Image (cartoon, rainbow, N blue to C red):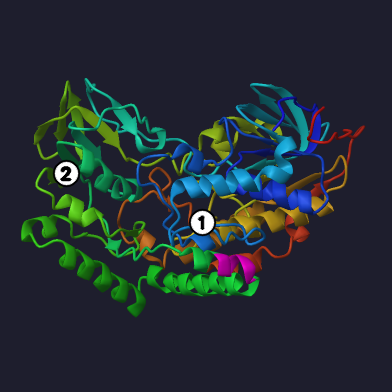
């Protein structure tokens, strides 16, 4: 992964997580050599580089959580530990390593209407690109508790884990009960003297049913590609059935609700604790979680559940909204990310000097979940309405990348491809209409909902297969093509300049 920066490329990709690397690998396979991947971290991996807390693991079956064009038979568990996923991504990056620039942050990107290309300003210099691919993901900007006061000791976010923070024998406050907290608590409870868990709202938790893959199973998957393909196909079909449970009506959601509440009853014998852990909203309204260890950890004598949100810090005291006060040494914030307000939106300027943040002031929006009107030759991966509540997000990323390749195939030198406002508006109207029939808008607060726009802005309201079918063909009839107006840019390769 070289450090020199070419002055111009045909395609600039921002981010080297699953989406950015997936785009780069498919571009390479399609014969495109003039592209560059810019990554602000010192290594590839995206969220799997950032999230290194104890117990971090995938909550999608491992063999669905890898590229379809690079299946991986060597996962050790049904739900791969984070370190294995990170290694998989580092190994996957090898074919395009010479076009990746690490520790390079994008400072601004502006569309040049005259030259018909993007001018991208970075910490390592400026690069011009005909197409800009935003592959920054949704879980890249940690959200810390917005409360009054200052805590006297260490406060660490789960995505900025510091292994040097002393937990052994400490009094620890764990703020949040979402996906990261559910994975973290069992490990914290094994080390800390006292643990206080502050819960804003209870979450549905399903049995994880994790298991190891034996060496024999791994070798069989490696030597019999048909078996690995059949395993992936079976996992996909099983996951697709979960879409029905996200609809407000029907028996599927009731079945999963009963399963989650049965899991709670089986693992929590204390009636008071069980009541505090019983969700008050509908199953699927928030992200459903998987764990066989979280409830037992809450039942340990030195672990206390406070069914109330964090309200304030006062020295070494954490104060909950119910008025309870708890003296602790360390605060661990498993409080999520700025998922609906992406920081990069303030850095991108499209036609007429319009900022992407302004275009998204009423909630993130994109046609085909990928193209944004007024921002020619820009493609957003894993952004608005491009993830799922029931299946692997990698399926969505791969569909978007194929759509991107179709768009690039129509993009001649010096031209601009801009989706029409009408097509974008019609797509968003469809998304909003279909989302209204889902449980996501049944009244709970979740990271799927833009609290300012009061819109569901992250999830695709259909199946993964439907999304893949919709994006299987690039549809130029929804775009306006602007021809060159001057000399076109000569693109260099993305390797050493």
Viewer-proximal residue, 473 or 177? Answer: 177
For mark 1, give the secondary structure.
Answer: loop
- Contact between marks 2 and 1 (CB within 8 A): the answer is no
- Residue beneath the point at 63% across and 30% down: 102
Residue depicted at 14% across the width and 55% down the height: 276
Characterize the local packing of mark 1: few (<14), some (14-19) or many (20 or more) Cα atoms within 10 angstroms.
many
List the residue tagged with mark 2: 308
The image quadrant that residue 486 belongs to is top right
Q: Quadrant of residue 246?
A: bottom left
Image quadrant assignment for residue 313: top left
Q: Residue at x 46, y 70 (%)?
A: 239
Where residue 294 appears, as percent x and y from the top left, is 24, 54
Q: Where's residue 464, x and y in %?
A: 55, 66
Q: Which mark is residue 244?
A: none
The magenta stretch is 219-224
Residue 352 appears at what percent x and percent y?
Answer: 69, 33
Of all residues shown, which one is farthest toward the right?
A: 487
């Amino acid at each position: 992964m070289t450090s020199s920066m070419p002055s111009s490329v045909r395609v600039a990709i921002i981010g080297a997580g699953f989406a950015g690397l997936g785009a780069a690998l498919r571009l390479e396979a399609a014969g495109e050599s003039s592209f560059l991947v810019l990554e602000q971290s010192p290594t590839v991996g995206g969220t799997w580089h950032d999230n290194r807390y104890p117990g971090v693991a995938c909550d999608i079956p491992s063999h669905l959580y890898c590229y379809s064009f690079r299946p991986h038979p060597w996962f050790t568990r049904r739900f791969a530990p984070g370190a294995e996923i990170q290694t998989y991504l580092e190994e996957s990056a090898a074919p395009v390593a010479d076009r990746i620039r690490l520790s390079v942050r994008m400072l601004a990107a502006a569309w040049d209407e005259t030259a018909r290309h993007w001018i991208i300003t970075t910490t390592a210099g400026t690069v011009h690109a005909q197409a800009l691919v935003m592959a920054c993901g949704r879980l890249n900007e940690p959200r810390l508790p917005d409360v009054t006061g200052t805590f006297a000791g260490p406060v660490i976010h789960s995505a900025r884990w510091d292994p040097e923070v002393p937990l052994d024998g400490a009094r620890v406050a764990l703020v949040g009960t979402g996906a990261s907290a559910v994975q973290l608590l069992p490990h914290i409870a094994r080390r800390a003297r006292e643990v206080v868990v502050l819960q804003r709202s209870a979450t549905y938790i399903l049995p994880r049913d994790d298991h190891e893959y034996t060496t024999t199973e791994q070798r069989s998957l490696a030597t019999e590609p048909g078996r690995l393909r059949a395993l992936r196909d079976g996992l996909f079909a099983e996951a697709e059935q979960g879409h029905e449970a996200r609809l407000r009506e029907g028996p599927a959601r009731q079945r999963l609700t009963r399963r989650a509440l049965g899991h709670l009853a089986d693992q929590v014998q204390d009636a008071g604790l069980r009541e505090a852990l019983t969700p008050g909203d509908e199953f699927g309204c928030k992200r459903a979680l998987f764990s066989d260890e979280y409830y037992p950890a809450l039942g340990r004598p030195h672990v206390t559940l406070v069914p109330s949100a964090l309200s304030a810090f006062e020295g070494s005291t954490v104060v909950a909204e119910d008025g309870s006060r708890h003296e602790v040494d360390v605060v661990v914030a498993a409080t999520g990310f700025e998922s609906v307000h992406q920081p990069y939106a303030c850095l991108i300027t499209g036609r007429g000097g319009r900022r992407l943040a302004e275009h998204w002031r009423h909630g993130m929006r994109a046609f085909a979940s990928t193209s944004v009107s007024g921002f020619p030759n820009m493609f957003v991966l894993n952004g608005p309405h491009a993830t799922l509540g029931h299946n692997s997000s990698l399926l969505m990323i791969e569909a978007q990348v194929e759509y991107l390749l179709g768009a690039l195939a129509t993009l001649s030198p010096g031209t601009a491809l801009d989706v029409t406002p009408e097509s974008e508006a019609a797509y968003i109207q469809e998304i909003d209409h279909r989302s209204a029939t889902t449980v996501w808008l049944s009244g709970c607060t979740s990271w799927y909902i833009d609290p300012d726009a009061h819109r569901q802005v992250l999830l695709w309201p259909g199946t993964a297969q439907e999304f893949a079918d919709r994006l299987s063909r690039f549809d130029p009839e929804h775009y306006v093509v602007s021809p060159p107006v001057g000399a076109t840019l000569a693109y260099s390769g993305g390797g050493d300049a």
